[in-house]
Amino acid sequence: MLPPDLRSAEAEALVAIQAALAAGAKGLWSVELRFEGLRLLPVALRLQAALAPTVAGLRLLCADAGATALAQRDAPEAASQIASLRDQMRLQQADGGSEGVLLLLAPSPSDYEEVEQVCALHRGAVVLLNGNLEDAAVGIGSVARQRRKGFLSGWQSAYALIPTGDGALRRACPGAWELYRRDPDGFRFVSQFDHKPDAEEQALALAGGAGLGLGGNLKVMDAFIEGLRN
């Protein structure tokens, strides 16, 4: 069942993150709330505040000094637990690594190297909130293949709520991936998967026994091309 609003989605994400962290002291987990126009910093600060009482050594990491200063301004009570990726790297270099749980706020492809280094020297779990570490410029080259086989392939989904052209995808750890179809009167559950379904799998599930047809195949091809770009 899809959450009716953002706060409900945050509550689901919190429970899913806690379930993921309970699975082991170390792991790479992603959280995706892919809504256009979403102000992500308030969401991150609320998740940090909700997790802090039960998660030892929790730190929120921002991509750069400007984003870090903004987060510290908006949450002065948690300012000492908010830092930048470079701050964390300096701490790790001084201490030979780091412990606890890291919550990474929306790093971009330009932050890939820093994120990889931070994760390599961290002995606890890492939660990636709306990260986008794949660079479209190397999306189909050898560098991209190496990244997908290595660091990027190690991430697991703790929580995902992703609108699609025809509906939405949802995943809450430890549950399965769920696909919903958007109908005129709301969203309806279509199918579930043990992995994140690609565009073709989604299209086939939405088409049911009718098959894709020409229009469905064109949508799959469009999604494939867009995936190469992104």
Image (spheres, grey):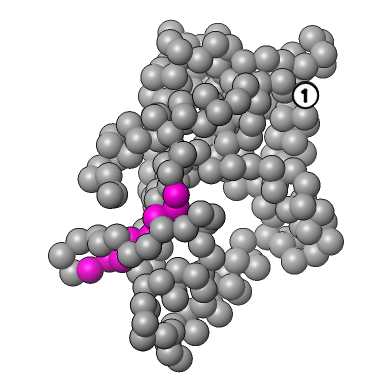
Give x and y (percent) for residue 222: 53, 77
Number of numbered discs overlaid on the protein picture: 1
User: Few, some or many C-alpha atoms within 10 Å of disc 1 (few <14, some 14-19, many ≥20)?
Assistant: some
Identify the main secondary structure in magenta: strand
> In this rendering, is residue 216 above or below 2?
below
Determine the residue positioned at 39% across, 68% down: 165
- Find residue 92 and report its image quarter: top right
Nearest the viewer among 7 and 75 is 7
- Find residue 50 and report its image quarter: top left
Where does the magenta region start and end? 176-183
Determine the residue positioned at 25% across, 60% down: 187
Nearest the viewer among 224 and 106 is 224
Determine the residue positioned at 41% across, 85% down: 211
Residue marked by disc 1:
121
Q: Is residue 156 left or right of residue 86?
A: left
Q: Is residue 48 left or right of residue 56?
A: left
Element on which disc 1 rests: loop
Residue extending farthest to the left is: 185
Determine the residue positioned at 29% across, 60% down: 189
Give x and y (percent) for residue 31: 49, 39
> In this rendering, is residue 134 above or below 119?
below
Residue 135 sits inside the magenta stretch: no
Give x and y (percent) for residue 202: 45, 69
**Type of residue at label 1?**
Leu
**Quadrant location of the C terminus in the rendered image:** bottom right
- Find residue 188 and report its image quarter: bottom left
Give x and y (percent) for residue 152: 70, 46
> In this rendering, is residue 46 above or below 115?
above
Q: Is residue 18 visible?
A: yes
